[in-house]
Amino acid sequence: MLRRVAALMFILLGGCADTRPVVEPASSFDVQALGQGMATGASTIIGQASWVTEKGIKHDAMNETVTLVPSTPYVAECARIVLDATSHCADRLKPYLRSTRTDAEGHFVFGGLHPGTYFLTTRVCWAGGRRRLRPCQAVQGEAVIQRDGQTVEVSL
């Protein structure tokens, strides 16, 4: 599920041309549920984004955008669709995204959140080897805020 959400977020944030078929979700676009996720609250999500390479080297998401979106059936279906097809559902979700930037150690904060379930995604990039490539890895997570005023910690 989180892999699908990461794919959705990269499509939402990216501008790459896509030649896959266009498919739309069958789930209804629930403006009320998405709006509740955008409502102002007193809760906070704090976290750190990093990636450990297959050689065991840890890289932090330095100065990267972290994106948060409320969870709804429409969001979940859109995330599944974008794995194999393109969809205008990603465009419909843009008004419901929040974003922030990580610091040099990959730490980030989202404040003023309403209780609910949220998906978060970002990328971690690092200097490559001989060819000076800059490989990147998508990282994602989920945060559930159960009550107003709660602080939830996540590791992406």
Image: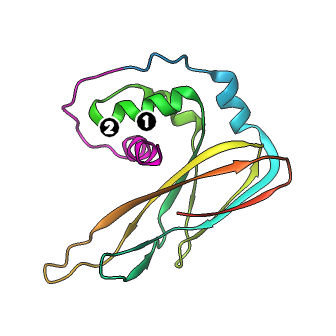
Is residue 135 depicted above or below 42 in this figure?
A: below
Kind of residue indicated by mark 2: Leu
Is residue 59 depicted above or below 125 in this figure?
A: below
Residue at 53% x, 57% y: name it. 66
Where residue 59 appears, x then y in whole percent? Answer: 42, 78
In the image, which residues are magenta?
1-23
Q: Is residue 73 left or right of residue 3?
A: right
Give the residue at the far left of this rendering.
Answer: 131
Provide the secondary structure element on which disc 1 rests. helix
> Which of the 4 image quadrants contains residue 109?
bottom right
Q: Is residue 119 left or right of residue 113?
A: left
Q: Are marks 2 and 1 in contact (CB under 8 Å)?
A: yes
Classify mark 1: residues with Cα within 10 Å, few (<14), some (14-19) or many (20+).
many
Provide the secondary structure element on which disc 2 rests. helix
**Residue 16 lies in magenta, yes or no?**
yes
**Residue 45 lies in magenta, yes or no?**
no
Which residue has dot 1 on it?
Answer: 79
From mark 2 to mark 1, how far is it between C-alphas? 7 Å
Where residue 8 appears, x then y in whole percent? Answer: 41, 41
Where residue 139 appears, x then y in whole percent? Answer: 44, 59
Which residue has dot 2 on it?
Answer: 83
Q: Nearer the viewer, residue 15 or 29?
A: 29
Residue at 21% x, 30% y: name it. 20
> Which of the 4 image quadrants contains residue 52?
bottom left
> Which of the 4 image quadrants contains residue 152?
bottom right
Classify mark 2: residues with Cα within 10 Å, few (<14), some (14-19) or many (20+).
some
Kind of residue indicated by mark 1: Ala
Residue at 51% x, 18% y: name it. 27
Is residue 27 depicted above or below 126 in this figure?
A: above
